[in-house]
Amino acid sequence: MEAFIPFYGRRKGRPLRNTARRLLEEDLPKYLIPKSLHNLTSLFSHQPEKIFLEIGFGGGEHLAKEAKNAPQNGYIGAEPFLNGVGSLLKHCSDKKLDNVRIWPDDIRLQLAAWPIASLDGIFIMFPDPWPKSRHASRRIINKENLAEFARLIKEGGELRMASDHASAKNWILSGIMANPHFSWSVEHPDDWRVKPIQWPETRYMKKAIEEGRKPAWFKFKRLSI
């Protein structure tokens, strides 16, 4: 019997448009990853040079642009919010992306079955901050998740994160800096205050800046222990 994993996010928002509904019905099966998965490379029609996972891809802009810019790689996106899944499917259709696969549910249902050092990086862009103290256990950065990320990311791989919420920034840094498997190398405030030029923009990022919130950009390296 599978262990129960509580889920606190949204599954669906505003009513799906006809296009999104059609994409979910007709296109999602082509991108869907199976419930039981032990070899990530086998997901793709090509032999990917690198494989990346984005957890909570939102509208899919970041993941789709990464996939478009590096067709030699494979990209897995996890997002339980159906409206976001529909949005990513549209990006995949418009950009004719064949190197994207989708898990439309809580990624924690998958990770334990994935082999060690099977990912070259994990992206977590603007996760829900769950700012109230009583909701701290819902934050994605915790000891259990970091242990799983460290198991999956290859030595020298990347954990990429961004947040526009003050308490979430502090929580991310304190959690990861206390973990011996990751390092954060910075030399100047611009290293986290300025978005790296190669990181794709998202709608949420633009909205945060327009509303006066200041995102921080974090790149952590998987160490050898």
Image (spheres, rainbow, N blue to C red):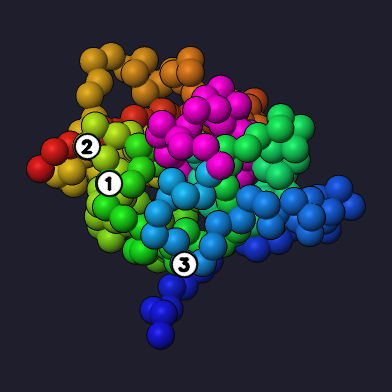
Q: Which residue is mark 3?
A: 36
Magenta region: 45-73
Magenta stretch encompasses residue 144 = no
Give the mark, 1 or 3, whose residue is nearer the N terminus: 3
**Cβ–Cβ below 8 Å for labels 1 and 3?**
no
The Cα–Cα distance between marks 3 and 2, rounded to whole angstroms, is 25 Å
Quarter of the image where one finds residue 153: top left
Magenta stretch encompasses residue 54 = yes
In the structure shown, which secondary structural element does the residue marked by tag 2 occupy? strand
Front of the two marks 3 and 2: 3
> Residue 16: x percent and y percent?
82, 55
**Tag count:** 3
Q: Which residue is mark 2?
A: 155
The Cα–Cα distance between marks 1 and 2, rounded to whole angstroms, is 8 Å
Give the mark, 3 or 2, whose residue is nearer the N terminus: 3
**Residues packed near mark 2 inside 10 Å, few (<14), some (14 to 19) or many (20 plus):** some
Q: Amino acid at mark 2?
A: Glu
In the structure shown, which secondary structural element does the residue marked by tag 3 occupy? loop
Q: Which residue is mark 1?
A: 117
User: In the image, is residue 26 above or below residue 118?
Assistant: below
> Residue 167: x percent and y percent?
39, 44
**Residues packed near mark 3 inside 10 Å, few (<14), some (14 to 19) or many (20 plus):** few
Q: Is residue 65 left or right of residue 118?
A: right
In this rendered view, identify the residue nearer to me: 129 or 25: 25
Residue at 42% x, 39% y: name it: 51
Q: Residue at the bottom extreme? A: 1
Give the mark, 1 or 2, whose residue is nearer the N terminus: 1
One can see residue 33 in this view: yes
Residue at 41% x, 80% y: name it: 2
The Cα–Cα distance between marks 1 and 3, rounded to whole angstroms, is 18 Å
